[in-house]
Image (cartoon, rainbow, N blue to C red):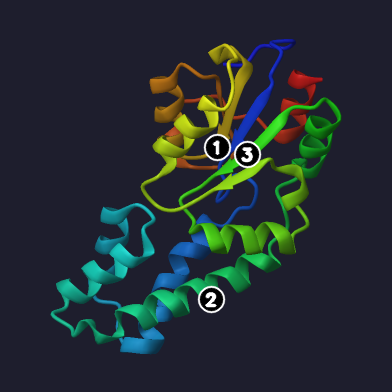
Amino acid sequence: MLRKNQNTKVIIFDFDGTLVLSNEIKRETYFEVARNLLGHTDNLEKCISQTNGDRRQVFTNFLNENKCSFNKLNLLVERYTTVVEEKIMKLNLVDGVENLLSLATKKRIDCYVNTATPIDAINRILIKKKLRKYFIEIYGNYGEKDNNLKKIIAKYTYANKNYLIVGDGIDDYEYSIKSSIPFLAVGCNPNLQNLKKTNFYEICELIN
């Protein structure tokens, strides 16, 4: 838990479910793309739940479960990336996000994004939403969040209490525990229902 006046110097944000409420859209798009390209979605729910966000692995497992040819794997992944990106571009930011990012910039707090979204896609989205200017660096790609966090921390010599992770996922929370870094939960992920949720206006108050 972050305490007011803790001298936060670095904030590391998740993206999906944190800066935009995109988790359900990403899930629904798997079904849309599979239905349009293959005509069915048999066992897709199971594949999504087992792979935790890796779009290529979701479709690989889906094709394997249904004993389908893998000649459409790349097309499925590419179509998913295109469609989900278009949908996310249209989403509003979570209320208070720009207030916090502007305040962090004013207070010279370094901000990063650390997400499972592919790096090229997240950069396009942040540029389109005019958010890229707020972040020192963007880290993406499935399965890399732990390593990315270590890379960010390695840039500095601050005490652990001077970092802050803001996210909606159990993975973000677990990274913060392993790294002894303060964590603030936002969004509506039921996996974090036992944690006190905050919002971006409250985070502004904490770091101001």
Residue 110 location, quadrant: top right
Residue annotated with mark 3: 112
Residue 59 horizontal side relative to residue 27, left or right: left
- 2 or 3: tag closer to the N-terminus: 2
Q: Disc 2 residue type?
A: Thr
Q: Quickly name the residue at label 2.
A: 82
With 72 as the anchor, is 154 left or right in this view? right
The image quadrant of residue 36 is bottom left
* Residue situated in front as seen by the camera: 55 or 148: 148
Q: Residue at x 39, y 74 (%)?
A: 77
Q: Is residue 74 above or below residue 193?
A: below
Q: Amino acid at mark 1?
A: Gly
Helix, strand or loop under label 2 = helix
Q: Position of residue 179 (x, y in %)?
A: 43, 21
- Residue depicted at x 36% and y 58%: 54
Residue position marked by numbered label 1 in the rendering = 167
Q: Secondary structure at mark 1?
A: strand
